[in-house]
Amino acid sequence: MKTNPIVGQGTPLRLWQTSRHLAQLPQIDILSLVPEGARAVIIAPHPDDEVLGCGGFLQLLAAAGRALQLISVTDGSASHPGSKRWPVERLSAVRPQESVEALRRLGLPLHRLKWLRGGFSDSNVAARETELCALIEHHLRPTDVVFTTWREDGHCDHEAVGRASAVAAKRIGATLHELPVWTWHWATPEDTMVPWHRARKICLTPPLIARKRHAIHAFASQLEGDPQIGLPPVLAPYVLDRLLQPFEVIFL
């Protein structure tokens, strides 16, 4: 079993900001990755990953009128283990509602957004990976461009969703791109575990970043921990800072 690398405060933001390696990543236009007539399919392990990983370029896709499909694999109800303030029952109801509000804040056309909720157990996706693969495959088309979490992102659900998405996309003939989310926490700019040769940078303007920040703040449950049991927030300020840089990265 892999050791969980998501511990402590992670890699300081200044290491990413001052990295010459990261600054030199090739830039790419999201509209060239999702050409006119294609559909972008975002497969999120938990409610919020779609915003954390690609809340910037989702705005660009929506503004260009690209068709969007969102698959939320779990309800995110395991984010506060042992908490009476945020029990599973409350989280299973609240977290999908937070996603709705976040997507509204991004300016996505909710009346046209196709949204599928997978109903898989948070933190246990790998146990039903074959089933998830079949579900994703059923909802993909050969012309789709799929965006999901990287298969080595450091969270068991992120990795299982990445693997299942990759298999399903290959079977259908859809294009797959992977997104680092927790990678920014445990990796470093020169980390050889990260496939930097596949990385491309999508630059974000200040208004896009501001809107992404506003959307992230819809996830109130993730911005709060539970002091009574010593549980810090999932999205602590130092986590958000790394996810609100003036670009988003994808692995081609």
Image (cartoon, rainbow, N blue to C red):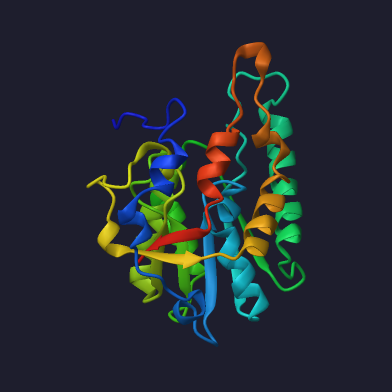
Along the viewing direction, whichever of 232 and 155 lies nearer the viewer: 232
Q: Position of residue 12 (x, y in %)?
A: 43, 36
Quick check: 67 above or below 220? below
Which residue is at a point 76% across and 53% down the rendered structure image?
101
Q: Residue at x 57, y 55 (%)?
A: 50
Residue positioned 69% across, 42% down in the render: 219
Q: Foreground residue, 98 or 21?
A: 21
Q: Quadrant of the C terminus?
A: bottom left
Q: Nearer the viewer, residue 248 or 230?
A: 248
Compared with residue 112, is residue 217 higher up or lower down, i.e. above or below?
A: above
Which quadrant holds residue 221? top right
The number of callouts visible is: 0
In the rendering, at what x and y percent does residue 167 appear? 34, 62
Residue drawn at (38%, 53%) of the image: 150
Quadrant of residue 113 in the image?
bottom right
Does residue 5 lie above or below 68 as drawn? above
For residue 159, say whether it is visible.
yes
Lateral position of residue 234 relative to residue 145, left or right:
right
Residue at the extreme left of the image, as rendered? 192
Q: Quadrant of the N terminus?
A: top left
Whether residue 121 is visible here, answered yes or no, is: no
Q: Where is residue 10 shown, x and y percent of the image?
A: 42, 32
Q: Position of residue 7 (x, y in %)?
A: 42, 27
Side of 242 relative to 98 (left or right): left
Residue placed most toward the observer, 178 or 75: 178
Q: Residue furthest bottom?
A: 37
Question: Relative to residue 2, is residue 63 drawn left or right?
Answer: right
